[in-house]
Image (cartoon, rainbow, N blue to C red):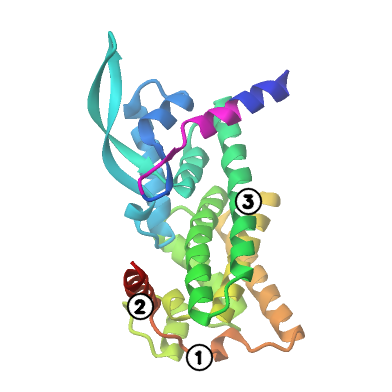
């Protein structure tokens, strides 16, 4: 019986999934709130705020995952009215269910749904990656993947007790220090000749991005699987994972990440790709 209930609830999340005119999937805030058992949307706003904070803490653009729009809402007698709402990406939904009321059974089922669907998407994306041939294509793919996984890592870190932005910055520095032989973000900036305003990830080649993606995914998994608690323990875990990735690179005879060349700003690569696509239209 429980299995049927779970399957029914999982299908609800799929049923409310929508596709926009450009083929991108999204979920609307008011529909998701209703499914998650929030009868008063005002209570759901607090959950949305936490999801936004998670985006900021992981240096992601909120507008890439939570977009304001007006949603048609039934107000009785078959009538509808436009109400302020949001369009959520899959990762925004992941953050929402991670921050929703854990006492609600449907919330736990939502966490399972979005975790499973995200994993399926990752497998499909890796198959796409294996078909890529140019360095630019690989960089764009891996940078996008790292952006998404940093959101998941921030969520896992928050669950361990890394709450404030300054604490998350320290947590990230521990991961970098493990992977880069003791170098923190400011040291990597200096070594690569970057300005303070430039993001390290935007100037990594595909090899370096892949190493950091592995660090992020493994750190998230370890934090969740071992139910790490406390900022100190979370920081140590991130450092250890980074150091393990570094050791693996060494054993394989690879180049240490701090010795890899500084790549062209990926924003320029994105711009060139857009122009190239325009030329094909």
Q: Residue at x 59, y 52 (%)?
A: 121
Q: Which residue is mark 2?
A: 272
Q: Which residue is mark 1?
A: 261
Q: Which numbered disc, 1 or 3, marks the residue that appears first in the sequence?
A: 3
Boundaries of the magenta span: 9-21
Residue 101, horizontal then vertical, whole percent: 50, 31
Q: Which numbered disc, 1 or 2, marks the residue that appears first in the sequence?
A: 1
Q: Which numbered disc, 3 or 2, marks the residue that appears first in the sequence?
A: 3
Q: Are marks 1 and 2 in contact (CB under 8 Å)?
A: no
Label 2 environment density (alpha carbons within 10 Å; few <14, some 14–19, many ≥20): few
Q: Which residue is mark 3?
A: 119
Residue 45, horizontal then vertical, whole percent: 34, 35
Which-is-in-front pick, marks 1 and 2? Answer: 2
* SS type, badge 2: helix
Which-is-in-front pick, marks 1 and 3? Answer: 3
- Considering depth in this image, is 189 or 28 the residue closer to the camera? 28
Question: Marks 3/2: CA distance?
Answer: 30 Å
Question: Marks 1/3: CA distance?
Answer: 31 Å
Q: Residue at x 61, y 70 (%)?
A: 131
* SS type, badge 1: loop
- Considering depth in this image, is 62 or 164 the residue closer to the camera? 62
Which-is-in-front pick, marks 3 and 2? Answer: 2
On screen, 264 above or below 100?
below
Label 3 environment density (alpha carbons within 10 Å; few <14, some 14–19, many ≥20): few
């Amino acid at each position: 019986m429980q299995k049927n209930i779970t399957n029914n609830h999982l299908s609800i999340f799929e049923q409310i999934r929508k596709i926009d005119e450009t083929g991108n999937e999204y979920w609307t805030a008011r529909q998701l709130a209703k499914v998650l058992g929030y009868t008063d949307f005002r209570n759901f706003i607090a959950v949305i705020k936490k999801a936004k904070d998670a985006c900021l803490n992981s240096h992601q653009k909120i507008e890439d995952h939570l977009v304001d729009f007006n949603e048609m809402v039934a107000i009785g007698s078959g009538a509808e009215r436009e109400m302020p709402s949001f369009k959520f990406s899959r990762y925004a939904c992941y953050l929402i269910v991670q921050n929703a009321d854990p006492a609600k059974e449907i919330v736990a089922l939502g966490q399972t749904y979005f975790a499973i669907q995200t994993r399926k998407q990752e497998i499909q994306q890796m198959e796409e990656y294996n078909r890529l041939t140019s360095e630019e294509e690989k960089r764009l793919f891996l940078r996008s993947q790292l952006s998404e996984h940093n959101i998941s890592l921030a969520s896992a870190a928050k669950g361990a007790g890394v709450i404030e932005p300054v604490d998350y910055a320290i947590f990230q520095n521990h991961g970098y220090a493990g992977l880069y032989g003791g170098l923190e973000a400011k040291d990597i900036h200096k070594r690569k000749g970057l300005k303070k305003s430039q993001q390290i990830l935007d100037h990594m080649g595909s090899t370096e991005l892949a190493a950091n993606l592995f660090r992020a995914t493994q750190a998230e998994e370890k934090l969740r699987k071992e139910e790490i608690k406390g900022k100190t323990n979370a920081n140590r875990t991130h450092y250890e994972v980074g150091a393990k990735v570094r050791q693996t690179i060494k054993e394989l005879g690879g180049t240490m990440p701090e010795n890899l060349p500084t790549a062209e700003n990926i924003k320029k690569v994105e711009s060139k790709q857009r122009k190239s696509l325009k030329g094909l239209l």
